[in-house]
Image (cartoon, grey):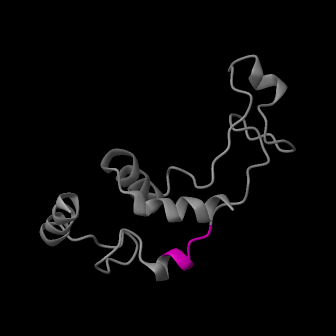
């Protein structure tokens, strides 16, 4: 009960706003979540861009020791960066719904 009171106090003092449309209530409102589309899986070398395989190509393997790289949204996406920061550094578990939808 005490933790619930703390949550309510935090919500009252620091209300959440959707990072996409600024509606109050959620970090990402249901409308914006419904319009969220993950990127297609990468089918090229993450280092040189050579197509054909999502793994690191033979030429790049001589320089780097990473077999491949996968992501569901590029980190350069400002909306995703805001969501990831909120989840990673502020423990906002409501963001996990977005991640789950993206990983399907």
Q: Residue at x 39, y 46 (%)?
A: 88
Residue 94: image location, x then y, percent: 41, 63
Q: Quick one: quadrant of the N terminus? A: bottom left
Residue 82: image location, x then y, percent: 38, 57
Q: Residue at x 13, y 66 (%)?
A: 9
Name the residue nearer the viewer: 30 or 53: 30
Name the residue nearer the viewer: 7 or 71: 7
Q: Is residue 22 left or right of residue 39?
A: left
Residue 14: image location, x then y, percent: 17, 66
Name the residue nearer the viewer: 91 or 52: 91
Report the label total. Answer: 0
Which secondary structure dominates the residues rendered in magenta?
loop
Outermost right residue: 52
**Residues in magenta, as a range:** 33-37
Q: Residue at x 51, y 74 (%)?
A: 33
Q: Is residue 13 above or below residue 75?
A: below
Q: Is residue 2 left or right of residue 59?
A: left
Residue 70: image location, x then y, percent: 67, 44
Q: Quadrant of residue 35?
A: bottom right
Q: Quadrant of residue 34?
A: bottom right
Q: Is residue 29 above or below residue 44?
A: below
């Amino acid at each position: 009960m005490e933790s619930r009171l703390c949550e309510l106090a935090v919500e009252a003092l620091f209300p959440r706003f959707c990072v996409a449309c600024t509606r109050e209530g959620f970090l990402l409102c249901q409308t914006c979540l419904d319009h969220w589309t993950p990127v297609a899986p990468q089918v090229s070398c993450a280092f040189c861009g050579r197509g054909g395989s999502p793994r690191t190509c033979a030429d790049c393997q001589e320089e780097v020791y990473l077999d491949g790289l996968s992501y569901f949204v590029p980190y350069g996406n400002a909306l995703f960066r805001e969501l990831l920061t909120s989840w990673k550094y502020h423990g906002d578990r409501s963001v996990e719904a977005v991640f789950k939808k993206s990983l399907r």
